[in-house]
Image (tube, rainbow, N blue to C red):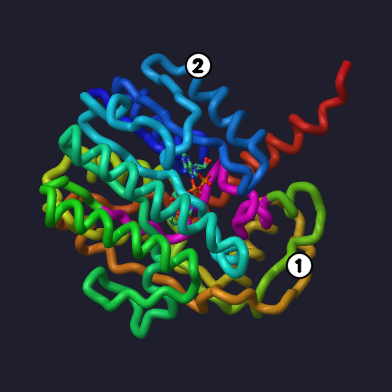
Amino acid sequence: MNVVVTGAAGFIGSHLSEALCASGHHVLGLDSITDYYDPAEKRRNLSVLARLPGFRFEELDLRTADLRSLLDGASVVFHQAGQPGVRMSWGAGFGDYCEHNIKATQCLLEAAKVVATPRFVYASSSSVYGNATSYPTWETDLPSPNSPYGVTKLAAEHLCALYTANWGLPTVSLRYFTVYGPRQRPDMAIRRLADAAVTGSPFQLFGDGRQVRDFTFVSDVVSANLAAGSGDVPPGTVVNIAGGSHAVMADLIEMVGELAGVPVDCRRNPKEAGDVQQTGGAIDRAYELMGWEPRVSLREGLAAQVDWSRSVHMASAVPVA
Ligand SMILES: NC(=O)c1ccc[n+]([C@@H]2O[C@H](COP(=O)([O-])OP(=O)(O)OC[C@H]3O[C@@H](n4cnc5c(N)ncnc54)[C@H](O)[C@@H]3O)[C@@H](O)[C@H]2O)c1
């Protein structure tokens, strides 16, 4: 199959592209390499992908590129591109969130509509739920984002549903719950935690440490995308993709310290605006419609991430001969 992965240079997009190539698909990766975090990390991800048979890359912005010719002939579009993160979405940052999450999605949907893409999978987020009124949270619960980021992710989800309802474009929106693993974005808590543990530097904790997250290992998110891209999920459906590994932040900090072999030096900071106290997704629909369920336990996933952080820091510490 020919498939398109947007955001291919990013954390999740690079893992998904790798898995698709490994299954023998021809992958066209698209990414504009935004500077939300160090572009050198994205270029490193791309250097791994460049070695894979079947992978091709175009550096472009979804808002301005001629997407029709690029999408023509693709069996699935996996739309992972976006401006992530809750904290930067307030104030002047909001414009970028509207542009990269709403406008870019609309441009992509428009092109997919014209070439009649057979399947469009959108990377949505648990942030559409905000501070949910009950846990686990079901897809039928009323979304109520608690951050401007969540508002833009929900808006793009609505756009997907609109293109299904009005143009018959078969979209599926996957609501990811905190994704972690090797190559995780440097702004995310587990990445900062694992880096702090292996380097002995302080970890900046926001909030009281009692916040609960439903963590999802990146390979489980990849398998959810593969299932959504190949299955018979009814067009316009939204599906929770949650790892089922509920953990209190304070316990997570302890677990990472154990895995790294040293307690983490934790520094407390006030809770940041937009952060929710708890996330937790019901995953019955993912199982019923796609046969999907998470496979990686939190301990296994954290061990993989700590190992990855260690290897990155050891590599950067090697003196130049
Ligand atoms: N990581 C998580 O825990 C998580 C949770 C919920 C939802 N998501 C969603 O999953 C997707 C991937 O997240 P990630 O953590 O891999 O982020 P990431 O920042 O590593 O990857 C996103 C990529 O999209 C690219 N991009 C942004 N705007 C673009 C545009 N206009 N044109 C082309 N490329 C553009 C960026 O350069 C980046 O490489 C995002 O849409 C995010 O909102 C992530």
Queried whether the magenta region covers residue 180, the answer comes back as yes
Q: Amino acid at mark 2?
A: Arg
| Residue 300 appears in the picture as rendered | no
Residue closest to the eye, 34 or 184: 34
Residue closest to the eye, 87 or 64: 64
User: Regarding mark 1 in the picture, which secondary structure is present there?
Assistant: strand
Instruction: Give the side of residue 294 with respect to residue 229, left or right.
Output: right
Q: Position of residue 277 (x, y in %)?
A: 51, 78
Mark 1 or mark 2, whichever is nearer to me: 2
Instruction: Give the side of residue 21 with respect to residue 319, left or right.
Output: left
Judging by the rendered image, the residue that carries numbered circle 2 is: 51
The quarter of the displayed image where residue 243 is located: bottom left
Q: Earlier in the sequence, mark 1 or mark 2?
A: 2
Residue closest to the eye, 166 or 121: 166
Q: Are marks 1 and 2 in contact (CB under 8 Å)?
A: no
Q: Position of residue 232 (x, y in %)?
A: 11, 45
Queried whether the magenta region covers residue 257, the answer comes back as no
Q: Quadrant of the C terminus?
A: top right
Q: Residues in magenta?
A: 173-194
Residue closest to the eye, 201 or 142: 142
The quarter of the displayed image where residue 136 is located: bottom left
Farthest bottom residue? 133
